Amino acid sequence: MTSEKHRGLFIVLEGGDRTGKTTQRDFLAQFFSDQLKLQTEKISFPDRNEEKTGKILDDYLKKKLSDMTDDKVHTLYSDNRWYRKDYIENLLNSGVNLICDRYAYSGVAYTAAKRRIQIPQIEQQDKPLEGDARLSALLEPDYGLPAPDVVILFELDANEAMKRKEVGQEEIYEKTEFQREVCRVFPQLCKLTTGREPIPFNQLFPEIDQDQKSFTSSYQLSSMFLNAAPLWISIDASESKDMIKEKMEKIALSLIAGLKDSPIKIIQ
């Protein structure tokens, strides 16, 4: 008798630069593999190893190219993701979990920040924002790509983020004012694509028992798999690495409990 096989989870980590996404992606992938004994892969976008667009984007980010328009760069980022569409779908359909550092939502947020789209504060919204149509247009090149089951948004003040040391060469977007603009876009993009703001982690999971070795959540996220849009959960990225790691594991276990046989979501 063979065990029932489900598709893999697709988890995307989003947020500004230097918020700890890559570190937590690696921690979470290890948790899936070592603790849960589940086959898991990790990926980052832009995928700089992708043969058609990766080298161009890498040179652009390292300030080696200066003659590309914002529209061209935006298209290249989307193309970079499309070249990995089959890879992502094949992994998920074969039951492999995929943890992704940045995806289409970063593509929108960074281009929107470059264009200085004016975005009112979320709490002032009582009607569609002026920038919604433009944000939709920026997401449109990615319509049809696999959508994540959950987007975990790392929230950190841009001033604090830019104080964090980063190994290697400073890249083109690593400026405080620019990162502040980027961070303003993500909540609006969430509202635009899901109809609601990102849900703070502490609202989903009010308490974490520090002595509990096996997370068994009373709050199951199974209902989210009935929705076409991803669930967005916000994380306070100013907390310690260990605390964030613990929260990521909590989210992952609750997602696994609710996965069942839901189809892969699509960006639309």
Image (cartoon, grey):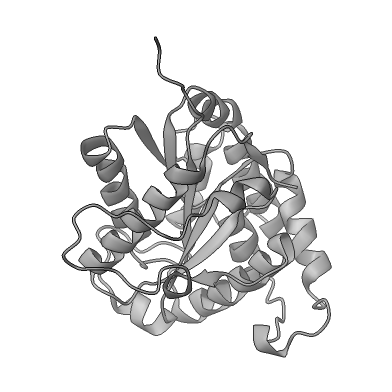
Could you tell me residue 27's position as x and y percent?
Answer: 26, 50
Q: Identify the residue at image location x=50%, y=45%.
A: 258
Side of 22 relative to 198 (left or right): left
| Closest to the observer, 148 or 59 | 148
Could you tell me residue 226's position as x and y percent?
Answer: 66, 47
Q: Identify the residue at image location x=78%, y=60%.
A: 136
Side of 228 relative to 213 (left or right): right
Residue 198 seen by the camera: yes
Quadrant (top left/top right/bottom left/bottom right) for the N terminus:
top left
Above or below for 255 versus 203: above
Q: Identify the residue at image location x=27%, y=61%.
A: 246
Could you tell me residue 231's position as x and y percent?
Answer: 58, 57
| Closest to the observer, 67 or 109 | 109
Image mark count: 0
Side of 151 relative to 190 (left or right): left
The quarter of the picture where residue 193 lies is bottom right
| Closest to the observer, 160 or 40 | 40
Above or below for 136 versus 34: below
